[in-house]
Amino acid sequence: MTEGLVALVATKSAITDLIGTDPMRMDPVFLPQKKTYPAITFKEMPLEPTNTFDGASTYDFHHLDIHFYAKTYDVVNNIFDVFRTEIEDSVGTFAGVNIDHVWFVASGMEDYIDDYKYWTKQMELKIAVKR
């Protein structure tokens, strides 16, 4: 599923204008050291299948935890807003993943990490995937 998310993001020039394309500054789970900013990390949370009585789930809900990083508060808020605007309600097949819908679920923590001198902000997405 996360390959589909990365492929979807790669189609959104408003996002890639901020996080680049070669390489795209979007990494799974954690932010590598000496990263150029702004950047995004993502982590897949528990998968929610749609179980049936006559076979395997054909429709899954993926919950993703997305974190944004930037050197200034204004930039971290901007990338958060751009990402939400571009990704929310997306539909299509990306890297072989059939995304039926993307929902913005919640935003949570924002913080300043003094040791690394960057701001961070978080959101949760719910992505419906046809299997």
Image: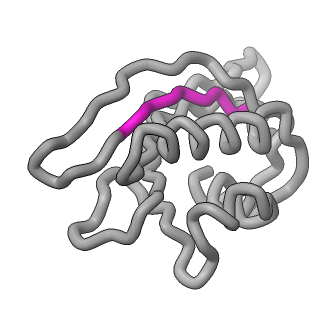
Residues shaded magenta: 120-128
Instruction: Inspect this view and state whether residue 125 appears.
Output: yes
Residue 5, above or below 120: below
Determine whether, in the image, residue 44 is placed left or right of residue 89: left
* Viewport quadrant of the C terminus: top right
Residue 82, above or below 93: above
Does the magenta-highlighted stretch encompass residue 16? no
Magenta stretch: helix, strand or loop mostly:
strand
The residue depicted at 33 percent of the width and 42 percent of the height is 119
The residue depicted at 78 percent of the width and 43 percent of the height is 86
As drawn, which residue projects farthest toward the bottom? 22
Determine whether, in the image, residue 49 is placed left or right of residue 69: right
Task: Report x, y in % for residue 99.
Answer: 80, 44
Name the residue nearer the viewer: 36 or 122: 36
Task: Report x, y in % for residue 106.
Answer: 56, 17
Name the residue nearer the viewer: 23 or 69: 69
Determine whether, in the image, residue 91 is placed left or right of residue 127: right
Instruction: Inspect this view and state whether residue 44 appears.
Output: no
As drawn, which residue projects farthest toward the left? 115
Res 73 → quadrant = top left
Res 79 → quadrant = top right
Residue 124, above or below 23: above
Determine whether, in the image, residue 18 is placed left or right of residue 129: left
The residue depicted at 28 percent of the width and 49 percent of the height is 118
Task: Report x, y in % for residue 6.
Answer: 63, 60
Q: How many numbered marks does the figure carry?
A: 0
Task: Report x, y in % for residue 121.
Answer: 42, 34
